[in-house]
Image (spheres, rainbow, N blue to C red):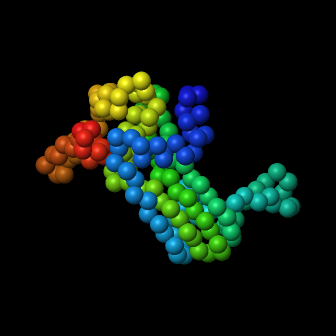
Amino acid sequence: MIKNIKYMLNGLNFLKVYFSPFKPIKPKFYIGKLKYGTPYFYPRKWVKIKDKPGYTKAVPKKIGFDFVTLGWKTKWDNTDYRFEWSPIWSFVFFKYQVAILFNTEHESQYWEAWLFYDINTDKSKTRKERIDECIKKFPLTYTRSYGDKKETINYYPLILKKRYV
């Protein structure tokens, strides 16, 4: 548990993915009217309510930055990772936004496997050995049903660089 808290406090940890066996993130840039939440709601701040001491309310940000780190949690044990939201850097100026979104294809599988790889594999091993450990201990093979048809997908070939598959 303490290990997870320390990891979450380091908001830029997700950038290590660029130097890993995982396919690189291609940031998406957005400039325009306010569109992206940080993470769930539009950028906002909390202000005190004058006539109610100890109470605050959310109001839209007029100007400000938000640096939202990778959103995740563990469910049943400390390796049961659940993806919640992708990182985003946002600047708001009145009702306009400049944002950098760090989304990936197959987001849930990508980030959950990345978390297992980064936190739970033996860092004294090579990258290939760590990926092999990841594949063995954190499988990403899912079967989906579409009516009477079934499809089985292994996500590792879709999220890893070719030389690690």
Q: Quadrant of the C terminus?
A: top left
Q: Residue furthest left?
A: 148
Percent from the top left, x then y, of residue 48?
80, 58
Tell how many labels: 0
Residue located 57% across and 53% down the image: 68
Percent from the top left, x then y, of residue 82?
44, 40
Percent from the top left, x then y, of residue 103?
42, 56
| 88 versus 33 height, above or below | above
Q: Nearer the viewer, residue 25 or 84?
A: 25
Percent from the top left, x then y, of residue 108?
38, 47
Q: Nearer the viewer, residue 19 or 10?
A: 19
| 3 versus 114 height, above or below | above
Q: Is residue 1 left or right of residue 46?
A: left
Residue located 57% across and 70% down the image: 97
Residue 6 can be seen, yes or no: yes
Q: Report which quarter residue 110 is drawn in.
A: top left
Residue 40 can be seen, yes or no: no
| 10 versus 138 height, above or below | below
Q: Quadrant of the N terminus?
A: top right
| 60 versus 40 height, above or below | below
Residue located 53% across and 65% down the image: 99
Q: Is residue 114 left or right of residue 63?
A: left
Residue located 24% across and 44% down the image: 162
Q: Report which quarter residue 136 is drawn in.
A: top left
Q: Report which quarter residue 120 is drawn in.
A: top left
